[in-house]
Image (cartoon, rainbow, N blue to C red):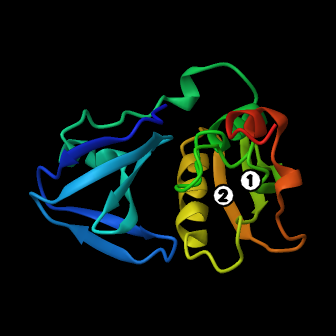
Amino acid sequence: MFHTEMSVEIQRDCDATLIPSGDKVSVKQGTPVLITQMLGSSYTVYVNGNLVRIAGKDGDALGLVVMEEEDINAGPGTVEDKVWRQLKTCFDPEIPVNIVDLGLVYTCQVIPFAKDSYRVEIEMTLTAPGCGMGPVLANDVEEKIRQIHDVVEVKVAVVFDPPWDRSMVSDAAKLQLGLL
C-alpha cells in the first residue's frame, strides 16, 4: 500500500486510463508525474492536470518494480473465499480503499457450474453514476476472478440501484478515510 505522493519521470512511453472518463491515453517518456496511489495492481498518477491509472505491469515506466500479483490459488480457502480475497485487491483509482470496503460490491454469487467448476456473478456499483471508470473496474474484477482455478465463467454487472452512498462504506474504511 502506498499513500504518500512521489514525483517521478516516466521512463518509457506507457498506456494509461484517464480518470474518471475511462478514456485510453498514452503518457510519453520524460513526462513528470506525481504518483498518488499504488494499491491493488495499478498506480494512480497525476499528470498534466489529470489523474490517470497505470497498470501494475507498467511499474517500470515509473522507475518502480513491476507489481507482481499474489497467486490466489496458492492459499487455502473455498472458491468463494478466494473470490472475496480477489475483490479486496480491486481499488477505486481515486479513493485508497478496496471496492469491498468501499461498499461497491452489492452481490457476489459463486454458483456450481459443472464438476469442480464454478460460475461467478457479481453486481457492483460506482461512487458516481457518471463515472467512466465503470468498465475499467468491472474488467479489473473479471480478470482477477478468472485467475481462480475452477472458475470457468464470470459475469460482472455494473448497476446503480440502489444508488451508492457513504453509509455503504465499512467502518474500517471510514476510519482509514478519516470519516469516523
Q: Residue at x 55, y 22 (%)?
A: 74
Q: Quadrant of the C terminus?
A: top right
Query: Quick one: label 2, few (<14), some, or many (20+) residues within 10 Å?
Result: some
Residue 12 horizontal side relative to residue 107, left or right: left
> Considering only vertical position in the picture, is 157 above or below 143?
below
- Closer to the camera, 172 or 177? 177
Q: Residue at x 57, y 28 (%)?
A: 73
Query: Quick one: label 1, few (<14), some, or many (20+) residues within 10 Å?
Result: many
- Closer to the camera, 8 or 73? 8
Q: Identify the residue position indicated by label 1 in the image.
A: 120
Question: What SS does tag 2 mark?
Answer: strand
Q: Are marks 2 and 1 in contact (CB under 8 Å)?
A: yes
Three-letter amino acid code at the position of disc 2: Glu
**Label 2, label 1: how far apart the Cα atoms are:** 6 Å
Occupied quadrant, residue 88: top right
Q: Find residue 149 and report its horizontal and vertical position in percent.
A: 59, 38
